[in-house]
Image (cartoon, rainbow, N blue to C red):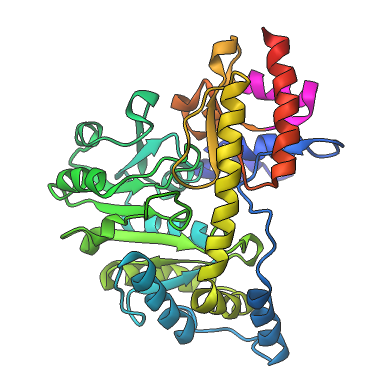
Amino acid sequence: MIDYSKALSQKARDLKPSGIRKFFDMLEGRKGVISLTVGQPDFATPWHIRDAGIDSIADGHTFYTSNRGTPEMRRELSNYLERRFDLTYNPETELLVTVGASEAIDLAIRATVDEGDEVIVPMPSFVCYDPLVHMAGGKSVVIECTAEDNFKLTPEKLRAAITERTKLIVLPYPSNPTGVILEKAELEALAKVILETNAVVLSDEIYAELTYGKKHCSIATLPAMKERTIVVNGFSKAYAMTGWRLGYSAAPEQLTEAMFKIHQYGVMCAPTVSQYAATEALRNGDADIEMMKEEYDRRRKYLVKALNDIGLPCPKPEGAFYVFMQVGHYGLSSEEFCERLLEEQQVAIVPGNAFGQCGEGYARLSYAYSLEHLKEAVKRMEKFVQSLK
């Protein structure tokens, strides 16, 4: 009989399950649960984008594409980045189409990190960075961002975390789970610190299109930062295309080439039908983004007021579609609060410590759900909060 303790790699065995996935799995088999756990838009992919995918199949575009992505998509992507974010990239050498933004993040880490290298990860943040750094043989250096700093990375904390082994700095803004953004002046202060090092920046901008009242600024637009920045983005959030599994990276040729070599051996190319659909999204999807963002904004304003009114304090998020609310003042841990809310009122949310230990005392709710869905959830949450008093 095989001994799996010896057959499996130590790195794989050391990985911990996602805290988000744990609560999502707890919903299996339950009826009547209102789930606010997953960052998945409740909108269907707009029809003109779906039609482009359907037409690509009908036209027989069912073969591999270029490893980098179709030339047409990369050209449209280049146009889109310049039009929407003032980012200029050569579609032939500086853009890479990936299987979701997740693959792009993995490629960026594996292309830059050697055994023992340090990667700075501000937390609370999305759950994937630390495990991927671990699998690449690197060491995550966690910077705990607190409510006192509005959960933002500060230049002082960044400078204190940098060592001679710092290889990569993750900038996950707009933030999942907190919804905070970094404005240009804040990015400039961070860039001043980063330019003193030889570190590369992984700028995860998957929520770049979902900011409210302030336009997203990419750190790659700042002087001298483009040459050391890997911008990662995708189609899941802005275009409601989660199941199409398509993302991309934008970076200088030397960084893109290193990521490309790993990509071509790992996945060959991103799904062909998804690339045709995404090309249509880039070309004609600006209005879709604005329509969905307007609806998210309505939900955001409702949810923040409603949660504060029932005794669950939270700041108004400036980006993404999450609210990060305080729950620790009821004498329960984040996990206890979320588990009891699920058991007693059939509402599922994610404990804040799933996004790093500094998230303890908080919980994340996604408002990528209908307003009716959110209103019913708030009613149940109010009953639960009253029971704790």
Outermost residue on the bottom side: it is 59
Which is nearer the eye, 209 or 243? Answer: 209
**Predominant secondary structure, magenta span:** helix
Q: Is residue 100 magenta?
A: no
Q: Is residue 339 magenta?
A: yes
Q: Residue visible at 44% across and 51% down?
A: 211
The spot of residue 5 in percent (x, y) is: 61, 39
Residues 388 and 72: in front is: 388
**In which quadrant of the rendered view does residue 59 lie?**
bottom right
Residue at (72, 23) in percent of width and height = 341
Q: Position of residue 327 (x, y in %)?
A: 57, 20
**Residue bounds of the magenta highlight:** 335-348
Give the answer, above or below, for where 173 lies relative to 304.
below
Residue 203 picture location, percent across and down: 35, 54
Measured as percent of width and height from the top left, residue 167 is found at 26, 49
Tell me, yes or no, if residue 8 can be seen here.
Answer: no
Quadrant where the image shows the C terminus: top right
The N terminus - image quarter: top right
In the displayed structure image, the side of residue 147 where residue 347 appears, left or right = right
Residue 127 left/right relative to 52: left
Q: Is residue 380 left or right of residue 30?
A: left
Q: Residue furthest top?
A: 389
The residue lying toward the viewer, choosing from 348 and 82, is 82
Q: Does 66 appear above or below 211?
A: below
